[in-house]
Amino acid sequence: MKFEHSARSIKSLILLFCYFCLLLILKFVIFAHIFIIIFSVLIGLPLAFDIGRNKKSGIQISNKEIVWFSGNFKGQIYLSDISSVELKKRLDLSYIVRLVDQNNNRIVLPAEALPKINILKETLRLYGISVIDRKFN
């Protein structure tokens, strides 16, 4: 399985455009205070910088290893070194994915490098890796 994600997508561009249109509406229609507008612009800047840099991320699972990357961060682990994979669902309904190796060391995979969680679970099970699914812990 191979999955890649780019920060510069149609969805991100539409979200950024709608966000700044909302800020313009707040400023010129509702006459919001300038500090509220500045604070709101600061909230939207990380998305604008990610789109500008076009940060790429992804994961590749093969018969031998798992390779992941997110920007300049890269990593790999052989399937024979993995004892299990922990999926922890958080209160904001996102997942933390940890690879547990034979020495009980945990490696956290970057969330932006992962495909949909159901696809990841099925792929890991196809390769014979045990998946531990924990909810809201």
Image (cartoon, rainbow, N blue to C red):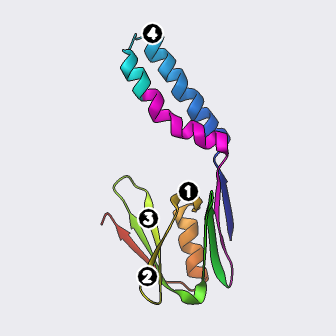
Residues at discs 2 and 4 in contact (Cβ within 8 Å)? no
First in sequence, mark 3 or 1: give its number.
Answer: 3
- Magenta highlight range: 40-63
Q: Which mark is residue 29?
A: 4
Judge left or right: residue 62 versus residue 122.
Answer: right
Q: Which mark is residue 112?
A: 1
Residues at discs 4 and 3 in contact (Cβ within 8 Å)? no
**Does the magenta-highlighted stretch encompass residue 52?**
yes
At which x and y percent is residue 92?
37, 52
* Up/down of 121 relative to 47, above or below: below
CA gap between label 4 and label 1 equals 36 Å
Q: Residues within 10 Å of mark 3 (few under 14, many from 20)?
A: some
First in sequence, mark 2 or 1: give its number.
Answer: 2
Q: Which mark is residue 105?
A: 2
At which x and y percent is residue 120?
56, 69
Q: Secondary structure at mark 3?
A: strand
At which x and y percent is residue 10?
67, 39
First in sequence, mark 2 or 3: give its number.
Answer: 3
